[in-house]
Image (cartoon, grey):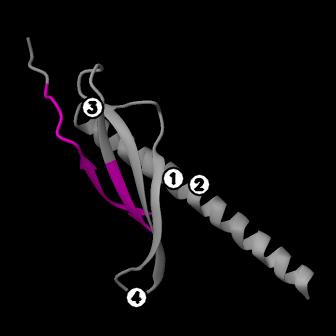
Amino acid sequence: MSDYLVLCGIAIALLYLWDAQGVKQIAYRVCRQYLESRGLQLLDGYVRTHRVWLKRDENGNWRFWRSYLFEFSSTGVERYQGMAVALGKQVLHIELEAYHIPEDG
């Protein structure tokens, strides 16, 4: 019986890791598109997981709530920080640190 529980635990951990990687890829794509649509550049080519916790969605179902941090630039020189928040597999919002808007010269 204990072998069965160990295998189930390993299977659950692997499913979680697979799901977490998929949501992280979704967050990366959404952040990149969001920044590009505003003329900004995603730096370092990744988002990193900041926090994970459980929260109920609008239907009362438990979902993983994840926040991701990333860095971006408006000029290619300065670095600013942003955060994306996902509930389940959907990115709910993106927050950007105040950044310099370059003047057209």
Tell me what residue is drawn at x 8 percent, y 19 percent: 103
Q: Which mark is residue 60?
A: 4
* Quarter the C terminus occupies: top left
Say left or right for 54 vs 71.
Answer: right
Q: CA distance from mark 1 to mark 4?
A: 23 Å
Locate residue 23, reporting x and y percent.
Answer: 51, 58
Q: Is residue 90 magenta?
A: yes
Q: CA distance from mark 4 to mark 3?
A: 36 Å
Residue matched to label 3: 40
Q: Amino acid at mark 4?
A: Gly
Q: Where 62 falls versus 78 (above or below)?
A: below
Residue 14 placement: quadrant: bottom right
Q: Residues within 10 Å of mark 2 (few under 14, many from 20)?
A: few
Q: Amino acid at mark 3?
A: Leu
Tell me what residue is drawn at x 31 percent, y 44 percent: 82
Span of residues in magenta: 83-101
Locate residue 31, reporting x and y percent.
Answer: 36, 45
Q: Earlier in the sequence, mark 4 or mark 2?
A: 2
Q: Where 55 falls versus 38 (above or below)?
A: below
Residue matched to label 1: 24
Q: Secondary structure at mark 4?
A: loop
Q: CA distance from mark 2 to mark 1?
A: 5 Å
Residue matched to label 2: 21
Q: Secondary structure at mark 1?
A: helix
Q: Are marks 2 and 1 in contact (CB under 8 Å)?
A: yes
Q: Where 58 falls versus 89 (above or below)?
A: below
* Quarter the N terminus occupies: bottom right
Q: Secondary structure at mark 3?
A: loop
